[in-house]
Image: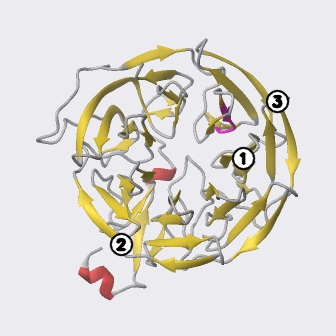
Amino acid sequence: MSASAAARPRALRPLVVAALLLAGLSPAARSPAAGHAAAPARAAWSATQSLDTGRDHATATLLQNGRVLVAGGVSNGTCLETAELYDPPTGRWGPAGSMATARYAATATRLQDGRVLVAGGILDGRHLGSAELYDPGTRTWSATGPMTTGRALHTATLLADGEVLVTGGFDGTNELASTELYDPTVGRWRPGLPMTSPRMAHTATRLTDGRVLVVGGIAVRDLPLPITPRLPIVGVYTRGPAAEVYTPVPGGWLATANPTVDRVAHTATRLGDGRVLVIGGYDVETGRPLASAELYTPATDTWSDTASMGSPHAVHTATDLADGSVLVAGGGTLDGYGTSSAAERYLPASGSWTGAGTMAWARALHTATRLPDGRVLVAGGRRAGTGTLAVAELFGG
């Protein structure tokens, strides 16, 4: 955070958040940054069967049986209630029933008993409070208690005690500081203590000690139009604490040290040593996509810079691999909001990046799921100039 920004903690700044629209994407490419080794094209990537329905803004959840549940999303402007299952041994997709409500920009959380909780999202401009459960044993969906507040672009984190913490998001009118907790034993939600700052399109990461680190996101005012993936968000950014930590007992929030950059549509990944790697996204002050990365160390409540990626990535995916590295794939790049097929890996031991080949399809707003055998399944998303994608591919193996 810049000194001038710190001196004006409530200053208002104009912001266009391209991370949430990605409409009119123009094909674009960028050469790797100096000192960042490019991998051979398509290295380590292979094709697999496509989704039955193309979708972006969907959720993807690894089930206890090793299959991957992909649910909801948008297909070229049509909101989806359908879900699909990917079976890694056969490399094929099959139907997984339909939710009661079509939704995109929702969250999906695997509960300790193996069921999947899908909550919130958007349908026809309405920000949903409804929630549903998927039972892998019966492959059926059922309603559960609604959230206390309709929201989208929020986060959902499974806590050590089995409850699910939902934070922030947007209710169609206001950005939210509110939180709530889902108790799967009774199927009900209850309000939690609010965050110190409203935010949406942020990240929430459970730390090794059970606390939850929330980073970045935006708070906007006076939006002229509801949030959709096809419309720009033009408003003003209100600076608050860029990061804060939730402690489940007694359930309170504390601001942390601030990261060096305020980000939105970034990723946050817990490393094997307990640190959290925060990557890319859009700079909330300029709207430009970022290549920078930084590390949060919970034990000392400090942030430190680490090597930047070879190119900017936002609304990308970041997946922790079995060897401890982190795979970054695709996303929005450049100021023209093109999409990328590039992939790279972060190596925690050296704090450096290495090339990870290129996907067959440039994409953003896709999903990425690490399979039990260590491979990563990338599915769906949007491509500049093409629209919603059904294609899927695998990294590794």
Lateral position of residue 197 relative to residue 62, left or right? left
In the figure, 109 relative to 79: above or below? below
User: What residue do we see at 23% from left, 21% from top?
Assistant: 40
Q: Which residue is mark 2?
A: 300
Secondary structure mostly seen in magenta is strand
Q: Residue furthest bottom?
A: 7
Q: Nearer the viewer, mark 3 or mark 1?
A: 1
The circle drawn on residue 198 is: none
Q: Earlier in the sequence, mark 3 or mark 1?
A: 1
Q: How is the image coloured?
A: secondary structure
Q: How far apart, in angstroms, are the residues tagged by discs 2 and 3? A: 43 Å
User: What residue do we see at 31% from left, 88% from top?
Assistant: 7
The circle drawn on residue 112 is: 1
Lateral position of residue 55 relative to residue 18, left or right? right
Across and down, in percent, residue 208 comes to: 50, 58
Magenta part of the protein: which range?
69-73
Q: Residues within 10 Å of mark 1 (few under 14, many from 20)?
A: some
